[in-house]
């Protein structure tokens, strides 16, 4: 975004404001989608927005967004934000705009990924399709993109960040079984279409002629995509600063207490190597590593400036674009890996289930971090330490913190996935107990 900081700064001298904040975003995304083993869609999308927050009389705040990313367009948005602020009631809890700060580095800005052509993505799709066995068909995506983020304000904040991301997904269907695999990275060159396809195809082969198993409490091995779903939901349900401060979180009043297995350490770190994060949040506050759970003990929560003031602390750099009454949330959680291979995790089971991923997951009871959803695209029975075949899918109803309290072993390999607009890096886990509430016919 040429002159992005200068473009945002066009709003700062608007008349009648005590303070102004401008958040600029530009997303360039390109997607190649395939189904029934053929490409059926290529799309490219460019979207940009300027979101201007103006402060009048110290605590009156107005926010206006525009897609007109010209100096005149940004100034008009600022003028409209001032007018909105003038008719908005005073908000005594408003903490003011962020102060000027220095930022670290995050993510990867890879030119080859940003400029990837439909032909390059199609070649990756062709590679995946080349691994299909007899009677198999596949669907999925190859996606590339680049995001630019700018925050400026009248206190001197001036942050610019650009990063790229690439991902592959592959869902393979056989006669009576399916398999799923995915990979995400900051650059297209870091992905392996061969690996993604072989993992998905292998699950189809291993899951043929699925058998019925009874619902109930099971020992489970959750692969990285399934663990990622649980961790993302846990972050949104339990580690938002406002929810914690208002007593609406499972860890409200429990910081410093053990909340799950000592094998669990969870850190939100957008600056970590390989994590496609940004070095500042939507208010211009610097991001840093934030320990959420350390050896099973709740150690931190994510704050924006508003929730931090409510809790009597400082922002941790987790603000979302204004207006945001929900407060900050961890968007880049990483679960510390262990030293077990996936085979080791399975070998430690007497009778258990292996789950590739969850589907249709939703919250049932936020205060207890209880979710419901289904297994999908690779669920297997383990007997005496080895996988003996596929099983029909099951619906689960389970508290995430309760499940993480039964962690028996942690995998050494991690997978990077995307959910809720953020990224999560996690290993596979073996849990002593996970509750499946009902069975399915597929």
Image (spheres, grey):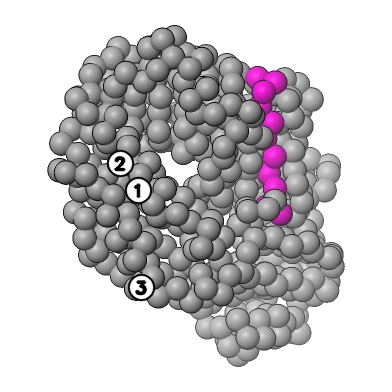
Label 3: state its secondary structure. helix
Disc 1/disc 3 C-alpha distance (Å): 19 Å
Disc 2/disc 1 C-alpha distance (Å): 6 Å
Residue 281 percent location from the top left of the image:
69, 59
- Residue 397 in the figure: left or right of residue 106: left
Label 1: state its secondary structure. helix
Position of 107 relative to 72 (above/below): above
Residue 427 percent location from the top left of the image:
56, 35
Residue 242 visible in image = no
- Please report the bounds of the magenta region as a residue range: 261-271
Q: First in sequence, mark 2 or 3: give its number.
A: 3
The crowd level at tag 3 (other Cα within 10 Å; few <14, some 14-19, many 20+) is some
The crowd level at tag 1 (other Cα within 10 Å; few <14, some 14-19, many 20+) is many
Q: What's the residue at 36%, 20% (across, down)? A: 387
Residue 225 percent location from the top left of the image:
46, 38
The answer to whether the residues at label 2 and label 1 have Cβ atoms under 8 Å apart is yes
Position of 41 relative to 309 (above/below): below
Disc sitting over residue 118 in the figure: 3
Q: What's the residue at 54%, 47% (across, down)? A: 416
The crowd level at tag 2 (other Cα within 10 Å; few <14, some 14-19, many 20+) is many
Look at mark 2 in the image and give the residue it sits on. 201
Label 2: state its secondary structure. helix
């Amino acid at each position: 975004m040429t002159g992005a900081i200068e473009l945002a700064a066009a709003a700062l001298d608007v008349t009648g404001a005590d303070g102004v904040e401008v958040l600029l975003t530009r997303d360039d995304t390109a997607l190649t989608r395939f189904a029934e083993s053929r490409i059926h869609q290529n799309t490219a999308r460019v979207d940009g927005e300027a979101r201007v927050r103006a402060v009048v009389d110290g605590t009156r705040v107005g926010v206006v967004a525009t897609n007109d990313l010209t100096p005149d367009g940004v100034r008009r948005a600022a003028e409209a934000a001032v007018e909105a602020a003038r008719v908005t009631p005073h908000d005594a809890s408003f903490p003011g705009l962020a102060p000027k700060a220095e930022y670290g580095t995050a993510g990867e800005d890879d030119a080859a990924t940003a400029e990837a052509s439909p032909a390059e993505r199609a070649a990756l799709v062709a590679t995946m399709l080349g691994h299909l066995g007899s009677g198999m068909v596949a669907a999925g995506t190859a996606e590339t993109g680049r995001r630019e983020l700018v925050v400026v304000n009248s206190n001197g904040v001036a942050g610019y960040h650009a990063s790229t991301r690439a991902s592959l997904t592959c869902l393979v269907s056989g006669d009576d079984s399916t398999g799923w695999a995915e990979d995400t990275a900051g650059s297209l060159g870091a992905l392996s279409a061969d690996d993604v396809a072989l993992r998905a195809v292998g699950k189809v082969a291993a899951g043929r002629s699925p058998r019925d198993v009874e619902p109930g409490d099971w020992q489970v091995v959750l692969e990285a995509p399934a663990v990622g779903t649980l961790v993302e939901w846990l972050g949104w349900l339990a580690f938002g600063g406002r929810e914690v401060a208002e007593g609406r979180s499972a860890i409200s009043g429990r910081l410093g207490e053990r909340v799950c297995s000592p094998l669990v350490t969870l850190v939100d770190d957008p600056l970590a190597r390989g994590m496609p994060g940004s070095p500042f949040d939507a208010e211009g506050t610097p991001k840093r590593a934030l320990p959420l759970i350390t050896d099973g003990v709740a150690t931190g929560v994510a704050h924006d400036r508003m929730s931090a003031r409510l809790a009597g602390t400082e922002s941790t750099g987790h603000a979302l674009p204004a207006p945001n009454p929900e407060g900050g949330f961890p968007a880049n959680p990483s679960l510390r890996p262990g030293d077990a291979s996936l085979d080791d995790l399975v070998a430690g089971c007497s009778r258990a289930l292996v789950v590739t991923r969850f589907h249709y997951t939703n919250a049932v009871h936020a205060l207890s971090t209880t979710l419901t959803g289904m297994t999908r695209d690779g669920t297997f029975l383990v007997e005496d330490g080895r996988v003996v075949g596929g099983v029909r899918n099951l619906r689960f109803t389970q508290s995430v913190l309760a499940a993480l309290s039964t962690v028996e072993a942690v995998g050494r390999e991690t997978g990077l996935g995307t959910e809720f607009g953020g990224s999560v890096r996690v290993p596979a886990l073996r849990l002593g107990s996970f509750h499946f509430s009902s069975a399915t016919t597929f």
